[in-house]
Image: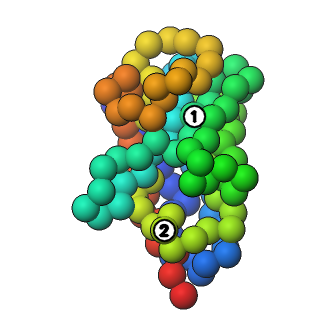
Amino acid sequence: QLQLVESGGGLVQPGGSLRLSCLASGLTLDAYTMAWFRQAPGREREGVSCIGSRDSSTKYADSVKGRFTISRDNAKNTVYLEMNSLKPEDTAVYFCARRRVRGLGCPADYQLVYPYDYWGQGTQVTVSS
């Protein structure tokens, strides 16, 4: 079964931290650019961060720059999202996704949904006091 499985979400107070993981099974990640998206109720899915296949390039949405860090461990077939200084507006379901086409870096259109072919089921992150 080909799937991405996210974990690590939960309820955290403002200013707190969480680390999300995205584990792939039945498919490999090492040759593909990966990304994290999020979707809050009533809003469109938003690209949060991207990491190139060789970990040499990363991109972040302005709303999370300086607070979130994306990383990957190709040997473990896993991508991570470290989230610090969390704010209530970070509350959303977070998804990881694998880019459809093999490639090295994070393209300018990394925040578009259609270039990704595999998606996880999502993990809920709630930031509230």
**Is residue 110 found left or right of 14 in the rendered image?**
left
Q: Residue furthest bottom?
A: 129
Q: Nearer the viewer, mark 2 or mark 1?
A: 2
Q: Is residue 6 above or below residue 91?
A: above
> What's the residue type where badge 1 is placed?
Cys
Q: Quadrant of the N terminus?
A: top left
The label shown at residue 50 is 1
Q: Residue furthest left?
A: 42
Q: Quadrant of the C terminus?
A: bottom right
The secondary element bearing badge 2 is classed as: helix
Measuring 32% from the left and 27% from the top, which residue is drawn there? 114
x%, y% of residue 68? 66, 52
Task: Tell me the residue that label 2 is attached to.
Answer: 89
x%, y% of residue 36? 50, 42
The secondary element bearing badge 1 is classed as: strand
Q: Is residue 86 above or below residue 76?
A: below
